[in-house]
Amino acid sequence: MTILAHLSDLHLLEHDHHQRRGVARHRLAFLSTGAPLDAEARRRRAQHELARAARAGADHFVLTGDLTEDGVDAQFEVLAQVLDDSGIEPERITLVPGNHDAYADDGAWQRALLGPLAPYQATSNPDVCTVLDEAVIKPISTVLPGQSFLRSAGRLRAHDVRAVEQLASDPVSRDRTLVVAQHHPPHHRGLGVVDWIDGLVGSESLHELLLQRGAVHVLHGHVHRRLTRSLCGREHAQVFATESVRDTQHSTRLYRAEEGTLREVHVPTPMAQPVAASDWLTRSPGAFA
Ligand SMILES: [Fe+2]
């Protein structure tokens, strides 16, 4: 049995963001509409969720994107510090980028993986997978090239879907649950224009793979709410989303990987230190997650 912790949408901020000027300042104000620009509170919430999942006995931690508010280098340094402070070994953490992590510039994520997030490269690089006792974790980046902060959509690349397909046929996945970690949901959001703005371009191929292979699962973020989806009448669910760490207390989900399936585990995890109610926000998920 392998226990996975699923955290998403941390939206971490750099401490001196108030010193920003020009476009960077306006971009941050736009992206954080409705959420206080409180770097310390966001950092504390992320720390708290990691600690809570660790206490609950998670073997591996999957963080499904929007790790930072707009992907400036200093925010990735804050993320690295939060992860380091958690005391969780880097080989037990998989990170994938979200659209917010690419708003500052295209190269930010790779730069972070070569810099402050280097300890997490081995489990987070899109070319790798992590093999656990009962699960295989495959990280995928759905970031659009030249991601504009006015468009929150993502793109699924054909070679990533082929890689998942090959992995599903590989002997390493025979007795394990295959878990794809990505930011955007692997299905259409609704109308064409909504999908263009906020959906996942190319999601059909992964959706088809999920229909064909019951042992393939997806953990995603972006929607800032808890979703559990079963496909084609299967008894077990294959697609899971969780709430935003920034916005919701106890947003972390735990799953048990066993016999090719993923099932949610509800573990009572009392907090070590009470968190003030004012530390937590309730914010409706918006189109620009
Ligand atoms: Fe988000």
Image (cartoon, rainbow, N blue to C red):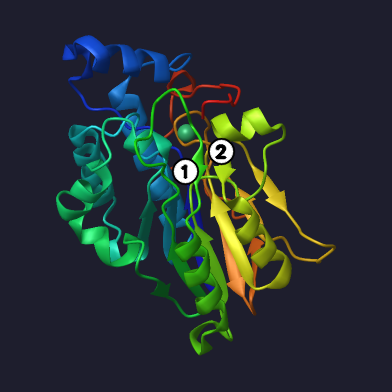
Q: Earlier in the sequence, mark 2 or mark 1?
A: 1
Disc 1 residue lies near ligand 1 with CB under 8 A: yes
For residue 224, say whether it is visible: no
Q: 109 and 264: which one is in front?
A: 109
Q: Quadrant of residue 173?
A: bottom right
Instruction: Judge left or right: residue 157 versus residue 91.
Output: right
Q: Which mark is residue 243?
A: 2
Image position of 74 with respect to 35: above or below: below
Residue located at (75% from left, 65% from top): 236
Q: Taking 256 as reference, is 187 above or below it?
A: above
Residue 8: % across, % down? 47, 43
The image's mark for residue 8 is 1
Quadrant (top left, top right, bottom left, bottom right) of the N terminus = bottom right
Q: Residue furthest bottom?
A: 171
Residue 285 — which label?
A: none
Q: Residues within 10 Å of mark 1 (few under 14, many from 20)?
A: many
Q: Secondary structure at mark 1?
A: loop
Spatial distance from mark 2 to mark 1, Cα to Cα? 7 Å
The one nearer the camera, 3 or 108, is: 108
Kindly identify the amino acid type of the residue bearing the numbered disc 2.
Glu
- Counting from the top left corner in percent of width and height, residue 185 is at 59, 46
Q: Is residue 276 above or below residue 251?
A: above
Asked if labels 1 and 2 touch by Cβ distance under 8 angstroms, the answer is yes
Task: Report which quarter residue 49 is drawn in.
Answer: top left
Determine the residue positioned at 39% across, 48% down.
50
Q: What residue is at 36 percent from the left and 40 percent from the top?
A: 67
The percent position of residue 247, horizontal first and vertical second, equals 50, 28
Work out whether residue 286 or residue 86 is closer to the camera in this orientation and state it: 286
Whether residue 26 sits left or right of residue 238 in the image: it is left
Mark 1 residue type: Ser
What's the residue at 47%, 28% (across, down)? 151
